[in-house]
Image: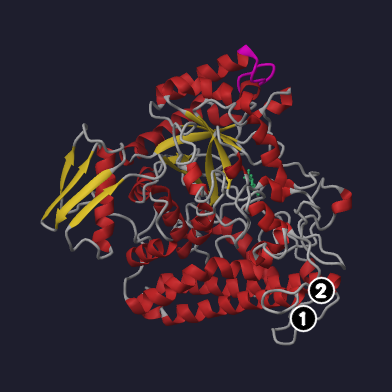
């Protein structure tokens, strides 16, 4: 199938598969814990214990083992932990374990719409089945999967929220879902549209300082808690990508967030206020969140958490961490990761996201000296005062597909999100080993090569899509394939058509140094100076921070241009190697799953070539240099690739 047809196929399958997928998740997801979670241990609930509510202790040898917890939910986590250890061969010895979660709230964000489509979803329709009978068993299974890996919250609907979500009818439905998930410790949250008072309540505006508006929210919140006493709170995308917000009335993000926080406060509800803000004509979109939010540091109520995407632009295959994490010291912040692979090949590419998540969480912000990692900041270790609660969010990759996530291996990214939210110190390798053992087998001959494939997969996708700090050269609408020539609507005309890569005869890359947009200075030293100089900037981020001449000498001794071509080639070779790894894994995997993964790996390899063909030929027009002879040459003419134009179901 050529790329054009394959891409059409990809789009159609996201519709067709959704239409014919099995109503209940299937047994292919073998990390699925047993229904009753029977483990060999005595369970003691001791409400006087000094454990946190979700924490547990496991003690003793097989046959004489005890799980101690403060709450029933804590005991459940203890049982799942023991079951995981039994399944991964770690429970045959004397145990003495005490675990408490790194983050108090570990939350999936579903970008699900009320018509059951999912924004940036690649695994079929929404599992909530809006407007259809409640799929009780499916939701139970979903909640159990989450509970087994420590996830304790779900935002049910899209951040691009419709006011209708808060209608009585929908809230009653949300309450039914909450009832099903409650025994598994999974709380529901909702995304809200800031204009709801006007759009749903018929008020003349939704100004956060208007007493009528405040009253409307207070009454709405009271109604919600009457239906759902353990409701978690609101997620808000405001004044972002055309959505309404407090700035429409000359108010600040803090005015908006605090008004909602006051309504939620009597019930211990929280507001997760997103920092994903940018203007299409911004001279540097990467600067904007910091510029808008830093002046508001310390002005938010203590039940507001600012939800910040891991990178300053948008879930790219690689970005530096958002400088806001090192910036605010008087405001609670949480990381938002994207588990769904909007910018990483949909559900067609095998990319284990744990290494990406880990890279961000382990990044040192230096906000209070060395060791002030993003994880340390967001768990409240650096500035405990604002952290009345701590949280982490992941945009879900879950849909109604029989295997839940569209790709068997995409399940591992859901799994690792939960495990890292529970214990931020776990390594990606440890988590992958656990997942492989529970999902496939612990046979060494299978595990070692497949583990290596998972662990290198994120770097491979960076290589064949956007090596060396390149970013956002995706097709403008669907974000699936390459379109470095894309001209975003509304952007400043003098920046078109190459806002993010800035390629020209003189070189390539976005100058964010002190001579450019100054973004480097949103970071603390020693990062600011390190990023500012081409001598010290890590090569992985070179084009993120610098405009580099095509002939710039790289650490490999090659010119930048040659190095870039080599990286694309390296990515393709990796994608090819994965096919071989999977072929050798055949004896260990059932035919159905083996074939499904095999078919996707072929798509991945062909997409890798598509990326290379588009990027090296397009950038070659600026560099004027030939693709080096020691790498594979592009196959399809650029003009042909430029004709690939597709619209997905999404709003932008
Ligand atoms: C962008 C997505 C868009 C989302 C937006 C967001 O393309 O669909 O609505 O992020 O996070 O990456 O709000």
Residue 542 forms part of the magenta stretch: no
**Label 1 within 8 A of ligand 1 by Cβ:** no
Q: Residues within 10 Å of mark 1 (few under 14, many from 20)?
A: some
What percent of the width, then of the height, locates residue 375?
Answer: 48, 48
Q: Nearer the viewer, residue 144 or 294?
A: 294
What percent of the width, then of the height, locates residue 195?
Answer: 65, 26
Q: Report the disc number at residue 620.
A: 2
What percent of the width, then of the height, locates residue 476?
Answer: 73, 55
Residue 209 forms part of the magenta stretch: yes
With 627 as the anchor, is 40 left or right in this view?
left
| Residue 78, visible in the rendered structure | yes
Disc 2 vs disc 1: Cβ atoms closer than 8 Å?
yes
Q: Report the disc number at residue 627.
A: 1
Corner quadrant of residue 448: bottom left
Helix, strand or loop status at disc 1: loop
Q: Nearer the viewer, residue 127 or 324?
A: 324
Q: Which residues are magenta?
A: 200-211
Relative to 320, say whether 522 is above or below: above
């Amino acid at each position: 199938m050529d790329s054009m047809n394959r891409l059409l196929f990809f789009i159609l399958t996201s519709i067709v598969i959704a239409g014919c997928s099995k109503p209940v998740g299937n047994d292919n997801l073998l990390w699925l814990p047993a229904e009753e979670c029977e483990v060999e241990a005595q369970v003691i609930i001791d409400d006087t214990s000094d454990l946190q509510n979700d924490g547990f202790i496991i003690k003793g040898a097989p046959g004489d083992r005890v799980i101690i917890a403060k709450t029933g939910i804590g005991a459940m986590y203890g049982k799942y932990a023991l079951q995981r250890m039994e399944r991964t061969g770690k429970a045959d010895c004397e145990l003495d374990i005490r675990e408490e979660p790194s983050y108090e709230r570990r939350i999936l964000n579903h970008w699900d719409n009320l018509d059951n489509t999912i924004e940036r979803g690649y695994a079929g329709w929404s599992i909530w089945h809006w407007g259809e009978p409640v799929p009780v068993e499916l939701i139970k299974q979903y909640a159990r999967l989450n509970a087994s890996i420590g996830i304790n919250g779900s935002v049910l609907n899209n951040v691009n929220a419709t006011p209708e979500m808060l209608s009585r009818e929908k809230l009653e439905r949300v309450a039914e879902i909450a009832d099903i998930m409650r025994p598994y410790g999974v709380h529901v949250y909702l995304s809200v549209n800031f204009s709801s008072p006007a759009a749903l309540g018929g008020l003349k505006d939704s100004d956060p300082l208007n007493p009528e508006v405040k009253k409307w929210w207070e009454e709405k919140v009271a109604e919600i808690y009457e239906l759902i006493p353990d409701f978690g709170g609101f997620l808000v995308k405001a004044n972002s990508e055309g959505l309404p917000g407090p700035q429409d009335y000359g108010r600040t993000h803090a005015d908006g967030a605090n008004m909602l926080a006051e309504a939620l406060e009597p019930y211990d509800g929280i507001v997760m206020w997103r920092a994903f803000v940018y203007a299409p004509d911004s001279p540097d979109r990467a600067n904007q969140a910091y510029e808008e939010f830093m002046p508001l540091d310390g002005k938010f109520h203590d039940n507001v958490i600012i939800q910040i995407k891991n990178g300053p632009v948008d879930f790219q295959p690689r970005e530096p961490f958002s400088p806001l994490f090192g910036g605010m010291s008087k405001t609670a912040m949480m990381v938002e990761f994207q588990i769904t692979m909007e910018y990483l090949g949909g559900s067609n590419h095998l990319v284990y996201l744990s290494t990406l998540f880990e890279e961000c969480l382990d990044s040192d912000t230096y906000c209070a000296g060395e060791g002030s990692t993003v994880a340390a900041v967001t768990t409240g270790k650096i500035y405990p005062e604002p952290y009345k609660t701590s949280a982490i969010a992941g945009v879900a990759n879950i849909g109604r597909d029989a295997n839940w996530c569209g790709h068997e291996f995409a399940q591992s990214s859901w799994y690792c999100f939960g495990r890292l939210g529970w214990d931020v110190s776990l390594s990606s390798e440890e988590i992958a080993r656990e997942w492989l053992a529970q999902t496939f087998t612990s046979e060494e001959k299978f595990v070692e090569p497949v583990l290596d494939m998972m662990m290198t997969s994120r770097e491979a996708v960076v290589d064949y899509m956007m090596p060396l700090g390149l970013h956002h050269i995706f097709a403008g609408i669907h974000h699936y394939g390459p379109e470095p020539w894309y001209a975003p609507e509304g952007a400043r005309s003098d920046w078109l058509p190459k806002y993010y890569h800035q390629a020209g005869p003189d070189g390539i890359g976005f100058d964010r140094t002190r001579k450019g947009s100054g973004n480097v200075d949103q970071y603390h030293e020693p990062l600011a100076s390190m990023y500012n100089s081409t001598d010290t900037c890590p090569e992985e981020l070179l084009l993120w921070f610098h405009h580099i001449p095509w002939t710039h000498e790289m650490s490999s001794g090659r010119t930048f241009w040659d190095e870039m071509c080599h990286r694309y080639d390296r990515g393709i070779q990796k994608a090819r190697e994965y096919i071989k790894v999977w072929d050798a894994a055949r004896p260990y995997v059932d035919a159905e799953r083996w074939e499904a993964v095999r078919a996707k790996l072929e798509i991945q390899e062909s997409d890798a070539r598509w990326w290379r063909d588009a990027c090296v030929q397009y950038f070659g027009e600026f560099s004027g240099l030939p693709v080096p002879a020691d790498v594979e040459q592009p196959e399809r003419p650029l003009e042909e690739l430029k004709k690939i134009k597709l619209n997905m179901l999404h709003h932008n």
